[in-house]
Image (tube, helix red, strand yellow):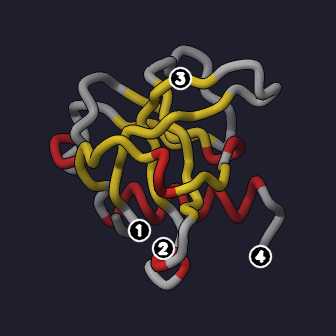
Amino acid sequence: MKRGDIVLVEVPFTDLTDAKVRPALIVSSDSVNRGDDRILVPISSNVSNPSPWDVLAGPSDVEFAATGLRRPSAFRCAKALTLSAGLIKRRLGTAGAKYLSQVGARLRNALNLR
């Protein structure tokens, strides 16, 4: 799996009481991805109340079909996490250059990186 892949992964709740299989975007560099872990941005189909750190994706976007997502979705950049590559179930698709650029900008903003 490489940077830009959208995968199904077991994402733990922030309080670690449970986990659910959810789509996520691999944002770690390919050099990091040679190791055992991946840095991911979880993806939610709840787009009704997006935060300033979310990137919205929908069927009207040119790049949406390649994502493998079934519904309009939000890349939750403020909820980035690191997980073992062994928790990845399968690849769904890929995020295009537009989504990766927007996610990168939101991550830098959420982490106050310039």
For the N terminus, the quadrant is: bottom left
Do the residues under discs 1 and 4 have CB atoms within 8 angstroms? Answer: no
Q: Residue at x 71, y 44 (%)?
A: 78
Position in image of residue 27 (x %, y %): 51, 63
Report the residue at 51% width, 41% height from top.
75
Q: Residue at x 31, y 32 (%)?
A: 58
Q: CA distance from mark 4 to mark 3?
A: 33 Å
Cα–Cα gap, marks 1 and 3: 22 Å
Q: Which residue occupies the foreground of this view, 40 or 57?
A: 40
Query: Which amino acid, by three-letter code, is at mark 2?
Result: Asn
Residue 94: percent from left, percent from top: 27, 55
The residue shown at (30%, 22%) is 71
Mark 1 vs 3: CB contact within 8 A: no
* Distance Cα–Cα, label 2 vs label 3: 22 Å
What residue is shown with label 4? 114
Are discs 2 and 1 less than 8 Å apart at CB?
A: yes
Local SS, label 4: loop
Residue ranking furthest to the bottom:
31
Q: Secondary structure at mark 1?
A: loop
In the picture of the structure, the residue carrying the numbered disc 1 is: 3
Q: First in sequence: mark 1 or mark 3? A: 1
Judge by depth and name the residue closer to the eye, 72 or 13. Answer: 13
Q: Earlier in the sequence, mark 1 or mark 4?
A: 1
Q: Which of the labelled discs sits on residue 33, or is there none?
A: 2
Label 3, on which residue?
20
Q: Are marks 4 and 3 in contact (CB under 8 Å)?
A: no
How far apart are the alpha carbons under marks 2 and 4?
Answer: 24 Å
For marks 2 and 4, give the one nearer the viewer: 2
Alpha carbon separation for disc pair 2 and 1: 8 Å
